[in-house]
Amino acid sequence: MSSQFDPIPMASSEPQQAPVASDEPNPIRDAITEAIGEHRVILFMKGTPEAPACGFSARTVAALQALDVPFAAVDILPDPRIRQELSAISNWPTIPQLFVGGELVGGCDIVIEMYESGELAQALL
């Protein structure tokens, strides 16, 4: 079972600028951090659990669904800043990214390895 939500502000038509380290509010980073904190299991992916937009996201969703684990999902495709901020938070460059209990588990390859070894089921208990 999965739940989907969109806590991330959508892109505006204004030109994008490179992020600058400052004390200015960052609503996208704040929304990502909040989503990770609010959901025990959350997957940042391309597309949705019902319609993954890449094979890696599809494989990760399939592993979670095979374990019948409820999870939240965020589509990173609507706004390139989501991926940029997520990677800055997690220090992980690829998508999908699975978080459990506020901690990054990893991407598709790690999730699949953990699924096959039974470690993912234990981590999700």
Image: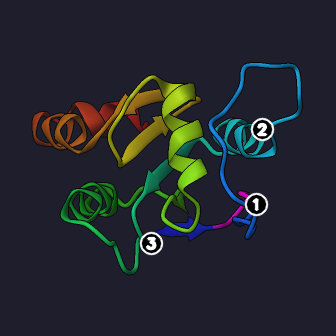
Q: Which labelled disc corresponds to residue 30?
A: 2
Q: Vertically, is 90 above or below 82?
A: above
Image quadrant where residue 89 sits: top right
Q: Position of residue 23 (x, y in %)?
A: 87, 20
Give 24 or 92, whichever is nearer the viewer. 24
Left/right placement of residue 19 relative to residue 71 reads right
Residue tagged by mark 1? 9
SS at mark 2 in the image: helix
Image quadrant where residue 26 sits: top right
Q: Closer to the N terminus: mark 1 or mark 2?
A: 1
- In the rendered structure, which amino acid carries the disc numbered 2? Asp
Chain part drawn in magenta: 5-9
Image quadrant where residue 12 sits: bottom right
Magenta run includes residue 56: no
SS at mark 3 in the image: loop
> Spatial distance from mark 1 to mark 3, Cα to Cα?
17 Å
Give 14 or 58, whichever is nearer the viewer. 14
Magenta run includes residue 6: yes
Left/right placement of residue 17 relative to residue 30 reads left
- In the rendered structure, which amino acid carries the disc numbered 1? Pro
Q: Quadrant of the C terminus?
A: top left
> Spatial distance from mark 2 to mark 3, Cα to Cα?
21 Å
Q: Vertically, is 24 above or below 124?
A: above
